[in-house]
Amino acid sequence: MNNTIVSLHSIPVGKSAKVKKLLSTGTIRRRLQDIGLIEGTRVDCVQQSPSGDPIAYLIRGAVIALRSEDSAQILVEVS
Amino acid sequence: MGLTSDAMGIKAVDMGLIIDKEKDTDQVIALAGNPNVGKSTVFNHLTGLNQHTGNWPGKTVANAQGKYTFEGRDYILVDIPGTYSLMAHSAEEEVARDFICFGNPDAVVVVCDATCLERNLNLVLQTIEITPNTIVCVNLMDQAMEKQIIIDLGRLESELGVPVVGASAARGVGLDLLMKAIAGLGQRNENKEKLFVQYTGPIEEAIAILEPVIAEKLGREEGARWISLKLLDENRSLLRALRDYLGYSLVDDCTVASALEQARTRLRERGVSQDQLQDAVVSCTVQQAEDVCSRCVQFKKPDYNATDRKIDKILTSKLTGIPVMLALLAVVFWLTITGSNYPSQLLSSGLFWVQDRLMDFAGYMGAPQWLSNMLILGVYRVVAWVIAVMLPPMAIFFPLFTLLEDLGYLPRVAFNLDNQFKKCHACGKQALTMCMGFGCNAAGVVGCRIIDSPRERLIAIITNNFVPCNGRFPTLIAIITMFFIANMAGFWQGAASAALLTGVIVLGVLMTFLVSRVLSGTILKGIPSSFTLELPPYRKPQVGKIIVRSIFDRTLFVLGRAISVAAPAGLVIWLMANITIGDSSVLAHCAGFLDPFARLIGLDGVILMAFILGFPANEIVIPIIIMAYLSTGSILELDSLTQLKELLVNNGWTWLTAVCTMLFSLMHWPCSTTCLTIKKETQSLKWTAISFAVPTATGIAVCFLFSSVVRLLGLV
């Protein structure tokens, strides 16, 4: 088991990871939880926008774009 | 684009919690659901109304209501804005929650997306917790089938303990079953165990302390568990709403207060803080949804959305995203311009033939000359111009745009442009409101409700006018065609005007960025806020429906509005041209008065006056200019753009006048409908005035600079 904890922002397109911890606070934290992003949720990085930010992630069957500031606040575990 | 009479705030929108029941037996049914799951499609099918639909989250921004009759009973259906949750983190969620909790609906139908059921169940579970009569409508079953997602509806029903109906609302499939389920809800004596989310031990203990007390106080079991949870959570906005609803404050009751204190102490003892409570509640709900789904949903094809990802690669990648976006825009314009060329000519010669016959007829009837001139050359001619110039481009542009909207392209535009908006300290969803602005700026302004941050919403409202609405396209197209590509032949003519028009739009978008940035550095200071943008699956558009809907809902509606403004404006302009004060007409006086200033910004008095008279509707600007010129000179038979150009050139137009008119058309005050909408949306005269002043000042500045530079360089 060689699991590393990184921020979701650093996950490249085509890779997936499991959410370890949400550092975000306030509205965005609740918003992320509402779309099902909680500890243990699998997230796939699917598409970068033309400028590289935001990035779209597959979360529980839906594709959601997040800005880098927000995805940097999501700690994930890559196996 | 949201350009139905509903979106313009004319019909039943924004009624909040006020439901007009005609009879006591009328059943009130709320339609809830995540954004973009087809609530409005279900709503339209059942009520026969035309709420705006399209493949992007956030179209429905206000409660709309309609009626239907099933088996002799009347039902009032309320379409609630889409929400992911009822925890009320945003204005829409608060509207949705308040309606479900306190609007006393007889039933709540939660519409779900079959291709994304797990996340949708989150809302279902929350709704079951709140209200006794929940029905689940799993919509988009056809698309799930295509993606080989198999949903066991029977199993889902027994797991949830509430009626579950499968549907494909766009095709009208399953809606009869839904109506039946709604009708059966009151009568059926239900003993099925509803699925309540099980929270962690300490939370359940705390609820157990509070729930019986609340139930007794309220005199009912339903919702007591949920209210207990919210009390523990200290949800302020809910407590307020609850107090308004009950007419007294629940927490002021001493038995409730002591039970609440006891429950809170229990939580503290078990080491659950306020934040942890919130997190745990959400996690348990999401977990529960996941569990249910794992037993009811089967994915036969793991990469079921591979096609969508491939399309996204083309439409949003670094290399192709922006070029494809511009190309799509240009193609839409090209089709619009080329396609409307011939019908426009046909319409105009037809309508002017009618004008001649009307004149003949008036002569034959012996009508006084002034009367027939006023009504036919004044009113009729302007109306005829508006129809001939506007109808064909609109009838082509609206369906094409709706097609892109239904496919699901608009959220991709927002995805592509978000980084620019972030640099301007604004929200990426502003791109969606701009797309709506293409149809009508008033609709664009209403659409700004999808932006959560009030600061960013105001920026989007103030700058929406930099996107030329459909009323301004024909003006731009006509000027481009007359002045810049007249010498080109056939195909190239269409292509070049499309390219130029795209250029004008791009300029409008750049101005939007610039002004947004300036606003967020000055009167609307702030940093960009966080947001999530959902990119929905691409959907096959229903071409037939799109054409019918965009012609009837949008084209004819906008045309009707334009004509109702054009007719009196034609009268006014005719009177102005024919009533003389001193040695010249009122028109000449007004134009003369405006002329010195207008010349400074590259226009002339007549053009500026036309823009001012065009305040009720931008569509009539060009017809007014023509009328004004015609009234002062010889009467021409204007049935082609070449003759029109001759008229303009005879009145001193140069290419600089043409460019400045286009620039001013792109950047000036919003039309009266838009101004009223801004007032309604912002509830503030100040922001309405600012929304009026900002584009106007920008336009004057740009036109002044441009014309000065051109004149200095001696290019004219």
Image (tube, rainbow, N blue to C red):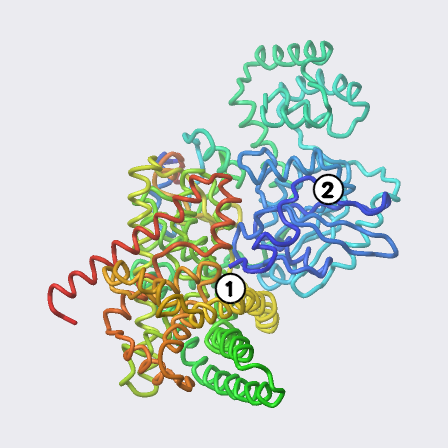
- What element does badge 1 sit on? helix
Instruction: Write down the chain letter for disc 1.
Output: B
Quadrant of the rendered image containing residue B235: top right
Identify the residue shown where x is 47% and y is 63%: B307
Q: Is residue B451 above or below residue B714?
A: above
Q: Position of residue B666 (x, y in %)?
A: 35, 61
Q: Chain of mark 2?
A: B
Asked if residue B417 shows in the view, the reply is yes
Could you tell me which residue is drawn at 60 percent across and 31 percent down?
Answer: B284
Residue placed most toward the observer, B262 or B502: B502
The x, y position of residue A47, in whole percent, is 38, 53
Which residue is at 62% across, 18% downward? Answer: B202
* Amino acid bearing label 1: Leu
Q: Nearer the viewer, residue A46 or B334?
A: B334
Residue B101 rendering spot, x and y as whole percentages:
70, 34
Residue bearing the label numbered 2:
B159
Q: State the SS at label 2.
A: helix
- What is the quadrant of residue A21 in the picture? top left
Horizontal side, residue B235 vs residue B217: left or right: left
Cα distance in 3D space between marks 1 and 2: 34 Å
Nearest-to-viewer mark from 1 and 2: 1
Q: Is residue B485 above or below residue B312?
A: below
Which amino acid lies under the numbered mark 2 shown in the image of this protein?
Glu
Task: Tell me the quadrant of the picture where the C terminus of chain B can be found.
Answer: bottom left
Q: Position of residue B220 (x, y in %)?
A: 80, 26
Tell me if mark 2 has few (under 14), some (14-19) or many (20+) residues whose alpha carbon lies within 10 angstroms of its own: some
Q: Residue furthest left?
A: B713
